[in-house]
Image: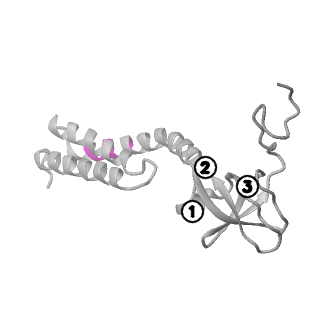
Amino acid sequence: MESPEEWRWVWIVGSAVFAVGEIVTTGSFFLLPFAVGALVAAVLAFAGIGVAVEWVAFVAVSIAVLVALRPLARRLDRSALDQGVGARRLVGMRATVIEDIPGGSELGMVRVEREQWRAQSTDGSAIPAGTTVRVADIQGTRLVVTADAAVPPPLEPPGAAGSSEAP
């Protein structure tokens, strides 16, 4: 298979296989450089260049594109959110206690975004309704929360009971 006419189709099929492989895998631009290298080799094959030169071009272009895409791939990997799957995505999020969480292993209710969950405190302390907490863990169908001291308590609307504002 030394004919450039045969190799042009090998390179085209190789480029297509690498491109499809890049699309269907979750890698960070691993197969794309080989697809580009095979495409360049196919163009050279259509130009009637020898097979040895095509192989050198394939390897050189693949390495150059791989080196060029590595910084982008690393940046995308770093900025990807690692949110977990299912309920695990809630770990670390803020929640509001909507029913008191009694001390011990008793359960109360919290709201995380628009979802309501049964919850208990991490250290067994009581947490009153209205307190902002942070989800520390998920155990079955309940959240384990800790009081979030860094978050200020929710503000009462003007004119609410207990407000010191005069009308």
58 drawn magenta: yes
Q: For the magenta stretch, what is the residue range?
A: 54-60
Task: Determine the secondary structure under disc 1.
Answer: helix
Marks 1, 2: nearer the viewer: 2
The tag on residue 87 is 1
Say which quadrant the N terminus sits in. Answer: bottom left
Q: Foreground residue, 57 or 30?
A: 30
Asked if residue 82 can be seen in this view, the reply is: no
Q: Main secondary structure of the magenta part?
A: helix
Q: Position of residue 45 (x, y in %)?
A: 18, 40
Q: In the visual, does 15 lie left or right of 160?
A: left
Q: Total label count?
A: 3
Which of the two labelled residues, at mark 2 and mark 3, occupies the earlier sequence position?
2
Q: CA distance from mark 1 to mark 2?
A: 12 Å
Residue drawn at the location 58% of the way across and 44% of the way down: 79
Mark 3 is on which residue type?
Answer: Arg
Mark 2 is on which residue type?
Answer: Glu
Asked if residue 136 can be seen in this view, the reply is: yes
Residue drawn at the location 85% of the way across and 66% of the way down: 125
The tag on residue 113 is 2
The tag on residue 134 is 3
